[in-house]
Image (cartoon, grey):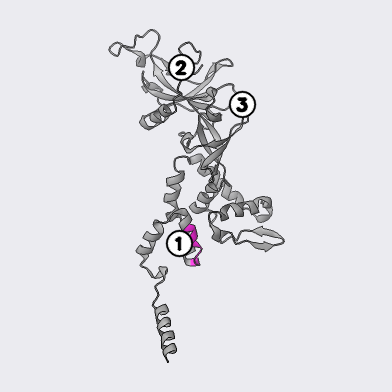
Amino acid sequence: MKSKFGSFENQKEDDNTTSLLDLPELTLECILDRLSPAGLCAMAGVCSSLRDRCTSDHLWEKHMKRKWGRVIGDSAYREWQWHIASKMRPRNLLDRSNQKGLIDSISRICPFLSKPRAENGEIQLKKSDLPVNSIMAWYLSLETGEFWFPAQVYNRENGHAGFMLSCYDANLSYDSKTDTFQARYSPHGRQTAEENISWDRLRAPPVDTCSYDLHISDSLVDLRPGDHIEIQWRKTKEFPYGWWYGVVGHMDSCDGNENHCRCQYTDTVTLEFKQYPASSRWRKTAINRKDHREVGNEVDGFYGGIRKLYKEEISKWKRLWPKQALE
């Protein structure tokens, strides 16, 4: 009787056990909202109900914004939409050779997704394992480096003097082991790839302008001495533009006295690149305020569109300022 009574008590205790899913809806949501990406992945492996909850967009949106918001822009989102569209094509049109590598990469973060089944000797992901068109899928594709996304790199080629205080378009892949990025640049130029790029050298493109297109400036009329700017520059017509940091200077005929300066009312805008010495041919250039298009030549390069900068962007460029003037 004692053993039966004990067995009954144990059964009663088991019957009174509260499941996580028995919690009030708001309480459960608060718990899930506090989980890290790895925590959400682990919780999603408990049961199908928690999987549905833990893969929902509203839980992953803040993680996406917190980690990737500074480097992901509109162009990256468009690239992602194309990327998932290609994955949703009929299976016989996909490149199956990369599937096992993708599964292995994602399984490092989300073990519950690495449940392959054999089919005709091939390893495949179950379609139900992960919503393809979801923020979670996008986050994991970035985290594993499986998705190469467009962004811009400051001071490319590890700070090579020829690229100091510039920012160039690149396709980037993340390495979670080193918390750095690999970049692929346009095939024109000194080199086309770079590794071990830190987060502070990346940004989302500030304007939606292709690196081969002239940016249409909208602030030329307002530019005055002391304003900070970025201007497109490229070595030849075949090269893509990079964005170069500079300031608006005074005309040679102006003594710089604020009480007498009329530079902002002239048709010519003088641009200075003070990272170069006064004797350098790269130190100054001038553009027409009213009718500016691309100007330049094969010796000095070609200057394109201009963006006026404000506090946060100015501070970023100043942190990248070289310790000594460039030659």
- The residue furthest front is 2
Question: Which residue does the numbered mark 1 point to in the structure image?
Answer: 53
Q: Are marks 1 and 2 in contact (CB under 8 Å)?
A: no
Residue 28's place in the image compared with 182, above or below, is below
Earlier in the chain: of badge 3 and badge 2, it is: 3
Can residue 47 be found in the magenta stretch?
yes
The image position of residue 180, as x and y in percent, is 52, 40
Spatial separation of the CA atoms under disc 3 and disc 1: 48 Å
Earlier in the chain: of badge 1 and badge 2, it is: 1
Q: Secondary structure at mark 1?
A: helix
Question: In the depicted view, which residue is nearer to us: 174 or 237?
Answer: 174
The image position of residue 236, as x and y in percent, is 59, 21
> In front of the other: label 3 or label 1?
3
> Number of numbered discs present?
3
Q: Kindly identify the amino acid type of the residue bearing the numbered disc 3.
A: Arg
Question: Which residue does the numbered mark 2 point to in the structure image?
Answer: 287
> In front of the other: label 1 or label 2?
1
Q: Do we see residue 308 in this rendering?
A: no
Q: Is the residue marked by circle 2 packed among few (<14), some (14-19), or many (20+) residues within 10 Å?
A: some
- The numbered dot on residue 190 is 3
**Rendered residue at 39%/16% (across/down):** 249
Q: Kindly identify the amino acid type of the residue bearing the numbered disc 2.
A: Ile
- The residue furthest bottom is 1
Residue 300: name its quadrant: top right
Give the magenta range.
40-48
The image position of residue 22, as x and y in percent, is 39, 70
Q: Secondary structure at mark 3?
A: loop
Relative horizontal placement of residue 194, taking residue 118 as reference (left or right)? left
Q: Kindly identify the amino acid type of the residue bearing the numbered disc 1.
A: Arg
